[in-house]
Amino acid sequence: MTVYRIGAGPGDPDLITVKAVKILKEAEVVLYDSLANDVLLDYAPDDAERIYVGKRAGEHYRKQPEINELLVEQGKKYDKVVRLKGGDPFIFGRGGEEELALLKEGIDVEFVSGINSAIGSATGIGLPLTHRAIATSLTLVTGHEDPQKTEKQVNWDYTADTIVVFMGVGLLKKYVPKILKYKSPDTPVAVIENGTLPNQKVITGTLANITEKQIKPPALVIIGEVVNIYLECEELRSKFE
């Protein structure tokens, strides 16, 4: 009995890995969440059970402990279980929590990397997260920490050239003032809504005005001078039209 923890990628179903597709085609049951494109479920056999476990900012169909219990239950019932999760299993994907829960019950776990939303969404619009001249460091940070923590780890005292915030749209007004303690108000910001999908939307601004923009989750927030590279490239690209 094995549970395969598969990264479904940033949203575009074409960005799933070949290895992930091979495993999905042999799955007996697939547990999937809202950020995993439903199209990917078509790779699973017709008789494979499909179980929706939800999870989107503010809308948890099942809480994480419930998902852990369900994975253990299915892992003991079937030989090949797939847990299909948006992005990559280990980049704010709760992969470590689910791995521990399964191994403690004697159930083996195998992981298949997925393109996480930071790389997939940024690359998809031509925004380089690093650049030799202006950005040689990169920080990935979550906008939502475990609410049960007695002490928060995200202090926003980051000196990285580029900061990418996952799941932070709902808290923009809260964390931007904290970042402004370390970054200039003129620091450019790009927000990518529904990255890599047909309804993708890119919103740009600065730390001084980004909270005034109309932004809806799911979205990725990118802070740093690399955003200006993207804007310059977009201006040059417009001349091709």
Image (cartoon, rainbow, N blue to C red):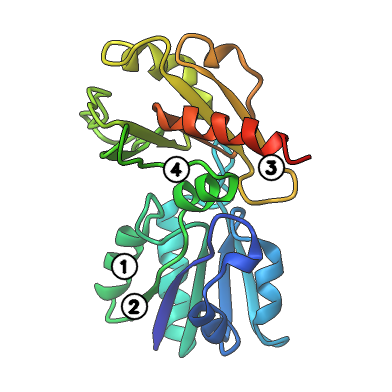
Reading the image, the residue beneath label 3 is 200
Picture residue at 46% right of the left edge, 65% below the top: 114
Q: Nearer the viewer, residue 181 or 81?
A: 181
The first of marks 3 and 4 along the sequence is 4
Task: Tell whether 161 sits left or right of 127.
Answer: left
Reading the image, the residue beneath label 4 is 128
Q: Residue 141: x percent and y percent?
A: 34, 37
Q: Are marks 1 and 3 in contact (CB under 8 Å)?
A: no
The first of marks 2 and 1 along the sequence is 1
Q: Which mark is residue 109?
A: 2
Q: Residue 158: x percent and y percent?
A: 24, 27
Measure the C-alpha gap from mark 3 to mark 2: 33 Å
The first of marks 1 and 3 along the sequence is 1
- Of circles 4 and 2, which is in front? 4
Picture residue at 51% right of the left edge, 78% below the top: 20
Q: Residue 207: x percent and y percent?
A: 45, 15
Reading the image, the residue beneath label 1 is 99
Q: Which kind of residue does numbered mark 1 sit on?
A: Glu
In this figure, what is the number of numbered marks? 4
- Of circles 4 and 1, which is in front? 4
Picture residue at 64% right of the left edge, 30% below the top: 235
The first of marks 4 and 1 along the sequence is 1
- Of circles 1 and 3, which is in front? 3
| Residue 178 against residue 239 in the figure, above or below | above
Mark 3 closeness class: few <14, some 14–19, many ≥20 residues within 10 Å: few
The first of marks 3 and 2 along the sequence is 2
- Determine the secondary structure under disc 1: helix
- Determine the secondary structure under disc 2: strand
Picture residue at 57% right of the left edge, 86% below the top: 28
Q: Which kind of residue does numbered mark 3 sit on?
A: Gln
